[in-house]
Image (cartoon, grey):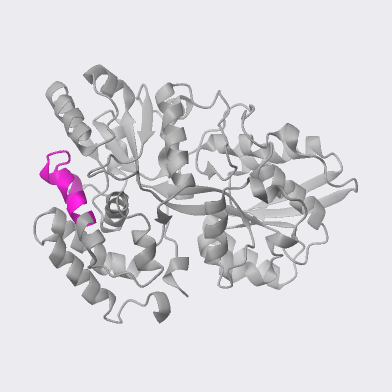
Amino acid sequence: MNTRKKLFAAGAVFATAVLLAGCGSSGGVGGAEEVEQATGEDATINYWTWFPPEATLNAAIEAFEAENPNITVNLRVFEAADYAKQLSLALSAGEDIDVAGVQVSAMTNAVKDFMLPVEDWEGDWIQDVNESMLAQTAGIADDGVLYSVPMGSIGSPIMYYNAAMLEEAGVEVPTTSAEWKSAVDSIQAQFPDVNPVVFQGETYWQEEMLFGFAEQNSPGLSDDIFGGDGAWDQEAMIDGLNAYKSIFDDGIVSTDVLSLTGTRPNEIFAAGEAAFYIDGSWQNSLLSADYRENAGIDLEDVGAAPLPLVDGGSPAVRALAEGGLAIPASSSNVEAASLFIEFMVVGGGVDVWAKDLVLVPSLNGYQLPDDVLQSSAAQEGFAAAAAVIGDPTSPRTSQQDFLNAVEGNAILDVLRGEQTAEEAAAYMQEEWTSGRYPHGSDQ
């Protein structure tokens, strides 16, 4: 299989703690009132999935059934680790399933032969779904056919910030590395015990950071390498490595950060001991004051933004379509199943599950209900994250064996001054073409 179709996601994405807030109106496209009942016949649809949490799903189903009293939804929720195996076995055994959640990156090719192509579904509401997320979902399938519709997407890197700390320090949210340096200097002067910037120093996260900077001026670089014939030693990669290293050279980030592993960066930020925390959009729950209170996180206000620009260009994020919803070809309730998926992807169901803040919804123009995020920093932060994730510079792709054995350590060597960018890029290209790490046409 082409490595382009092996999209990498942090294992903790859907284990992130979530908060269920009160139901509201999105005020955006495709609110619940815009979904028309598509079938007048009584129907019962069986819905298997692993995501979102069961409480959220039950609330969405209750809202759907209230709008469609002739349709009953039987829900079965699985643990994420067990779901792919159980769904594949059930489909091959002819289990009566009408709607199936699909882990887009991990499951598409394993279940697609049992699924009805989206072009054969009922309705024309797909036009309201983000084109980039649809294209990515279709591209994962070996045959390029769209078999599921993603509820939303995740992306990285995203920079979260302690909005109250920045306000007290009198600094604006930085959009360039020069502004970032100024903000860090002000924070260090006023809060000497605070870590200005934290993120994971583990090898896997270095790829996220690298492309977050490299694609500011070279959008599509990751896709060029993992999905095409691009070379690791091309000029754009060397520039990207130097751009990433510059935030250490300029004193924005200390190399001590590279010793942080696991949940430690999150803990430091949650304790109010860091001004900026870089991770993926699966940390969007930090934007919610209710979530922070329930989780015992004593932060007054949190915002989010893309990484500051190092040398011009545009903000860069790699994104991964997720939360796919599909209809098995064996379903005898395609019309009702299509209506339910429409409700979950572009209708009133979005307001129910989007408040968990795990995915950026795939509904074009979607806005969260007003009661989910209280501060302007949080509201503007979610909007900023949604904008870049909705129009990513590359799919969130990886070759994990290569990442763990070669790439991550080569990037760290550059950051620590143990190799030049040119040396690291040449080494990565040599290993990439060694035959030890199948990729592209090699798979």
Q: Please state if 20 lies on the left or on the right of 30 as rendered.
A: left
257 in magenta: yes
Say above or below: 141 vs 347: below
Image quadrant in which the C terminus is located: bottom left
Say above or below: 280 vs 372: below
Among all residues in the image, which is located at the extreme left? 418
Q: Please state if 414 lies on the left or on the right of 367 as rendered.
A: left
- The residue located at (46%, 30%) in the rendering is 291
Q: Position of residue 124 (x, y in %)?
A: 73, 50
- The residue located at (14%, 42%) in the rendering is 254
Q: Position of residue 125 (x, y in %)?
A: 70, 47
Q: Position of residue 168 (x, y in %)?
A: 25, 17
Looking at the rendering, which quadrant does residue 327 occupy? bottom right
Q: Is residue 44 visible?
A: yes
Foreground residue, 51 or 179? 179
Count of marks, rendered view: 0
Q: Position of residue 259 (x, y in %)?
A: 18, 49
Q: Which residues are magenta?
A: 240-258
Among all residues in the image, which is located at the extreme right? 41
- The residue located at (32%, 31%) in the rendering is 161
Foreground residue, 314 or 189? 314
Foreground residue, 266 or 164? 164
- The residue located at (58%, 41%) in the rendering is 364
Foreground residue, 89 or 310? 310
Looking at the rendering, which quadrant does residue 57 occupy? top right
Q: Main secondary structure of the magenta part?
A: helix
35 in magenta: no
Q: Is residue 194 visible?
A: no
